[in-house]
Image (cartoon, grey):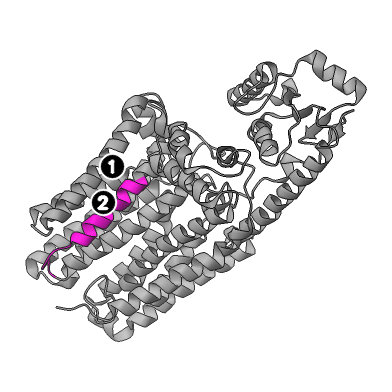
Amino acid sequence: MSPSSGSQALGHRPHDKRMLALSALAGFGLAIALIGRLVFSGYSILDDHDVVSWLGPNHRLAFSSIWHVLMSTEIGDSVGRFRPVMYGLMVFEDWLWGPHPSGFHVVAVLWFAIFLWGVAWIAFRSIGVLAGCAVLFLVVNGRFWSNIFTHSVMVSEQPALLGLGLGIFGYGLASSWFLKGGRGRFDTAVLLVSLGALICAGAKENFQPPVAFSILLLLAAWRMKAIRGWSLAGAIVLDLLGVAVCLRVILPNLGQEGSLLFRLWAVYHSRLFIYVAVAVGGGIASLVFGRRERRKRDDWDARAWVVLGFFLLGAGLYLAWELFFYDGRMPYGFDGLMPYGQRYDFPGLMIYPVLAGSLCFTVLQLRKRLPWAVRQFSPFALQLCFALLIVNLGTFYYAQGRLLPVISAVETSNRNTQKMEVDLRSSKILADRHPDWPIFVVAVVPMDYEAAVSAASWFRFYGIANPISLVVGVAPRDITSDSYRGLVRAMEEISAGGDKARGYEPATPAMVAGAQAQGHCYVVNFQDVHSPCTKLTYRPDQYFPEH
């Protein structure tokens, strides 16, 4: 039995190539429309100081220096975090693009486009183009995209988009193979999933579940003899590498980030646990129903319920992992629970479009089992109703000022990073008048830490050769938590002892007082604080991205 026009989810279709092209147009078009202007952004004041410090005074990373730089990152560390894909790509792109951050942004747009292409391909083939576009809107309207693409030229979630995109295509091909009756092999699907899982695991710790899913798919393909020898060997190598990356992260940090019971408690008490329960419960119900239907008649529709079941079950378990990983160790939300409104919500909050698309698919499938529904509702009418519901939701987002926030975030990034570049160049002109005058970077609140400790890297990158010192002027009343106390203590250590790696010299009270008394000094203020030193135009508090 072939699928009806109302729901041809990943089954045989005569115009698969046209659907692939249409979904590519949607994915790349959306990515360019939403974040394409990111290519006009410069370096971000957050985290990009590493990228510019690797370039050195010549603004060029030599090919012979790549290995040395890699070993200075997490890749060369035997403990702590381990993100080889992220740092490998970051160093390689630093060598490739040099002092041109637009190159990093072009790659970010490409990864986003591939991810959206995969989502569009799955959605269009599962629930139709109209309803699929509605699901795409739910995907791209997430607040976390702003943080992912404007926090710095590269965050871990960016290369993970490539891995997830490859995985989506791989699972789509595997589902097509299953829906068509399981004839032939699906080597390409297994290899895509294995490669995507390896990229995800090497991008960030919370992207480890795709490795487990990949191994399960590989075992299924091997058991059903649906994969050739060379493809099997290649997938095994990729999955073993993925497992090695996961073990490198898990074993050295076992038991160091909160107890297992507390993490499980955090999952259960999360505001998002209801979505875990719905997805897992719906997945199990769909699997049970699909198995029963296959006993009656093993046709496309029966198998489609099985595919839906695995899809929902995987999504629910992944969200549970995200809650376990984040809420169990570091509270970012106002109550310590997801959603945070930042990149940490990805891919957990993909549960919203997943459940919406699955509901639409379920309605289209149930329609075929009810004669009166077949007579009363066409598949297109149901798709239109679903799309209109999402349009109403979009109207609500618009009224709340929350419609596609990534667009305004990119505009803010362009404006602030360009202003930062102009201010650094004008600061160099001013500092060059008295190259022997010290520059005092004055931190006045604990959260100045990130921009304060990186200021010297930016000055060196723009050729400012004056001696630079960090001065901590944080009032005790502003130190309101242990984390703030730790940030202030770290800045005080740099201030007192200097930091050669960061480019800071010690700032003794006598030296600071003497320079200020003569007025022979420059100052970098995070706020308009009075100082006898000459103020540089560089104002770190004015360059932060919009999150």
At 46% across and 61% down in the image, what residue appears? 110
The image shows residue 220, relative to residue 136, as above or below, that is above
Left or right of residue 399, residue 427 in this image: right
The three-letter amino acid code for the residue at tag 2 is Ser
Q: Position of residue 520 (x, y in %)?
A: 88, 26
Quadrant for residue 410, please give it.
bottom right
Residue 122: tell me if it is visible.
yes
Where residue 386 sits: x, y (%)? 42, 72
Identify residue for label 1.
242
Residues marked 1 and 2 touching at CB (< 8 Å) = yes
Q: Residues within 10 Å of mark 2 (few under 14, many from 20)?
A: many
Q: Which mark is residue 446?
A: none
**Residue extending furthest toward the bottom:** 375
- Relative to residue 75, is residue 481 depicted above or below? above
Of residues 186 and 287, which is closer to you in this image? 186
Closer-to-camera residue (501/32): 501
Element marked by disc 2: helix
Q: Which residues are magenta?
A: 181-200
First-in-chain label (1 vs 2): 2
Q: Nearer the viewer, residue 420 or 427?
A: 427
**Disc 1 packing (10 Å; few <14; some 14–19; many ≥20):** many
**Residue 320: in sight, yes or no?**
no
Q: Is residue 459 left or right of residue 156?
A: right
Q: Which residue is mark 2?
A: 194
